Image (cartoon, helix red, strand yellow):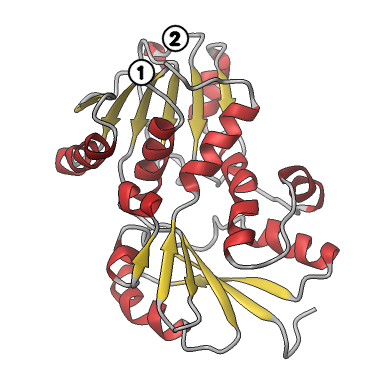
Amino acid sequence: MIQGSTSLIAHIGYPTHTFKSPLIYNPYFEQAGVDAVVVPMGCQAPDYPALLPALFRLTNICGALITMPHKVRTLELIDELSPTAQIAGACNAVRRAEDGRLLGDMFDGEGFVRGVQRKGLQLAGRRALVVGCGGVGSAIAASLVAAGVTGIALYDASIDTANALAARLHQHYPAVTIVTGSKDPAGFDLVVNATPLGMQEGDPLPIDVTRLDAGSFVGEVVLKTEHTPLLQAALARGCKVQVGADMLFEQIPAYLEYFGLPVTTPETLRAVARMTY
C-alpha cells in the first residue's frame, strides 16, 4: 500500500523490462509491514547525470538501486564512495547522508560471492574467469579476489576496460595472478558471464561452451530467464551453475542494511518473491 509516508527506492536503469528487484523487495516490504516501495525508473544514458541528483532532492527518497548501463557513470555523480566501489570502478547503491552528500557502494560482487559459497564452491586458491569488465563484472572480480581466488582472467570487448580493472585489482592485491585478453574457459574453476549477452533473443554465447570443463562452476548475471542459453549449455556439460537471480537474493540483505531498513534473509526473500521470467 503506497501512502504519503511511504519511502521510495528508485530502481534506475535501461531497459526496465528485465528488472526483477521490485518483484523481490516489494513483496517482502508488504509481508514485513515496511512502509517502502521499489519503483523502476527507465533512464537512458544521456539523461542519467541530470536525473540522479534531482531524485535525491525528493524528501521521501530512501535510496537508489543502480543497474545497467549506469553503474560506472555513477562514480562521477556522488560525493563519497566505499572502498568496494572504488576497487570495482562501479556503484549500484546510492543513499543520502544527513549532511546532504550522496554516498555510493557496490553489492553485486558480494551477492555473487555469497551465492556461489552457499552452493559449496570454496574460492580460496581457485582460478576464475570473468567475461565482461563493466560495472557488474568489475564488482564480481573485486569480491572474488577478496574472497581468496589466487588467479583471475579478465576479458572484455574493450581490452582497455579489462586492463584498467586488472590495474585496480593489482593495486590492492599484488599477490594475485591477473591476466587479460582471453575468454577461453578451459582450466578454470569458476566462469562468470558478466556481459549482457543472453538478454536478447539470438545473442551469441559469451564463451565457447565446448571448452568448458565438466567440473567448472558457471555463474550468470543476466536476469531475463532463469536458465539462460549459457547456463543450459553448461548444465548439459555437467557443470554446476548459479542463475542471475541468486546474486540479487544474496545482496538484498546488504542493501536493506545500507538503506536503514529492516533486514531479512535470502530464504525469506525467496519465499515471498513473485519472480517471473
Q: Which mark is residue 185?
A: 1
Say which element carries label 2.
Answer: loop
Between the residue at mark 1 and the residue at mark 2, the CA separation in whole angstroms equals 8 Å
Q: Which mark is residue 42?
A: none
Q: Position of residue 133 (x, y in %)?
A: 30, 41
> Relative to 93, does residue 253 appear above or below in the rendering?
above
Residue beneath disc 2:
213
Does any portion of residue 203 appear in the rendered image?
A: no
- Disc 2 marks a residue whose amino acid type is Asp
Q: Nearer the viewer, residue 170 or 41?
A: 170
Q: Position of residue 76 (x, y in %)?
A: 27, 68
- Residue at the image position 47 percent from the left and 82 percent from the top: 56
Examine the image and state in which quarter residue 153 appears.
top left
**168 horizontally vs 141: left or right:** left
Quadrant the N terminus occupies: bottom right
Residues at discs 1 and 2 in contact (Cβ within 8 Å)? yes
**Structural crowding at the residue carrying mark 1, measured as other residues with C-alpha within 10 Å and reported as few (<14), some (14–19) or many (≥20):** many
Q: Position of residue 54 (x, y in %)?
A: 41, 85
- Residue at the image position 46 percent from the left and 30 percent from the top: 147
- Residue at the image position 48 percent from the left and 77 percent from the top: 97
**Structural crowding at the residue carrying mark 2, measured as other residues with C-alpha within 10 Å and reported as few (<14), some (14–19) or many (≥20):** some
Q: Nearer the viewer, residue 201 or 118?
A: 118
Say which element carries label 1.
Answer: loop
